[in-house]
Amino acid sequence: MDKIDHITVATNGINMHVAIIGTGPTILFLHGFPELWYSWRYQLLSLSSLGYRCIAPDLRGFGDTDAPSSMNDYTGLHVVGDLVGLLDALEIEQVFLVGHDWGTLIAWYFCLFRPDRIRALVSTSVAFSPRNQQLKPMEGLRAMFGDDYYICRFQEPIETYEEFAGADTATLLRTIFTARDPNPPCLPKGIEYKALRDLPCRLPSWLSEEDINYYATKFNQKGFTGGLNYYRSINLTWELMAPWTGVGIRVPVKFIVGDLDTAYHLPGVKEYIANGGFKKDVPLLQEVVIMEGVGHFINQEKAGEVSRHIHEFIKKVLTSDQKQEPASPCSACVACN
């Protein structure tokens, strides 16, 4: 881990903390909630050793990156703007993009807004979801799951913040990271997060106390409000994305998900992936990988396999690029022209 450099980049009105290692084609990794750049620690080390420049920022509101106070500053357009500014600051024209959880949602937005900056995407956990212009996202979620669904509960900033703040951060993170129930998470009102400190929680082999302590230290410093604001901006992002209604993803894509991931078990998702809807909206979708017995935090739980899938896909794309490059003209052709 001491081989990873850490820099601060000014972008889009904020200061962004970035972990960076390696040289070669650039891979940009985007984390989810409640995660940090650290969620990609395994991929940073393994893929940089294979000849890639690996970059993993703390997204706005997380870790050592600035956290604007207004929840309206956390739309998909804001976060993609941060990333475009990051690439400009580092003088990077195009990247291979990898996302997980909220990082995958941001990655889909990035591909919609600025496909010129994305060479290809590896999406984990969350499939593309085309914009429904007839129904706001939160209305759909409430109708489907009720007010106790965790995303609906996260819309209540004061109550949710106080409940999170009352919990032991390390134990709360242990509980979230080790969850294996693929059913939609519901948080009935009155739940006491702070009571989680009394629950036994054995860590799996892929997650250490050192890892938990790193996450907990950063969230104790920053709080959870920035991360929760992504959920609270869902409807605003939907409103601002009206110009992209009906637009598909036009970059090569590989999708990886665990069969115990709650995102895979949302109503209609399996059918969308299996019956052609996903391929229709993402016409350059090249591969779908479903890992058996794997939960939501797939990039950490199956770090080696995920790194291998990323590497194989990038090699495939790079090989395809080389085959499509026009041959250099011979000297006679140059002379004739």
Image (spheres, grey):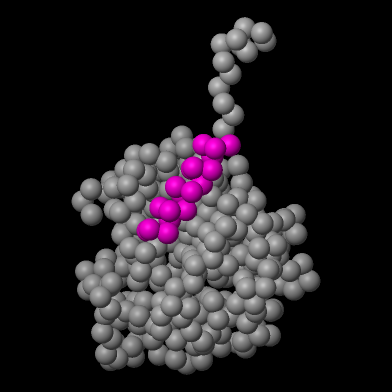
Residue interval drawn in magenta: 307-324
- Residues 2 and 158: in front is 2
Is 109 situated above or below 134? Answer: above
Is 35 situated above or below 138? Answer: above
Residue at figure coordinates x 49%, y 42% from the top left: 319
Is 314 situated above or below 135? Answer: above
Residue 311 within the magenta-colored segment of the rendering: yes
Give the x, y percent position of residue 277: 69, 68
On the picture, is 82 further left or further right than 282? left
On the picture, is 41 further left or further right than 253? left
**Residue at the right extreme, as displayed:** 134
Residue at figure coordinates x 48%, y 78% from the top left: 259
Secondary structure, magenta segment, majority class: helix
Give the x, y percent position of residue 196: 33, 88
- Residues 75 and 313: in front is 313
Q: Give the quadrant of residue 153.
A: bottom right
On the picture, is 178 further left or further right than 277? left
Q: Is residue 119 visible?
A: yes
Residue at figure coordinates x 37%, y 43% from the top left: 53
Residue at figure coordinates x 62%, y 88% from the top left: 146
Give the x, y percent position of residue 207: 27, 72
- Which quarter shows the C terminus? top right
Is 216 situated above or below 13? Answer: below
Give the x, y percent position of residue 137: 67, 73
- Which quarter shows the N terminus? bottom left
Q: Is residue 224 visible?
A: no
**Residue at the top extreme, as displayed:** 335
Residue 57 within the magenta-colored segment of the rendering: no
Q: How many marks?
A: 0
- Residues 157 and 234: in front is 234
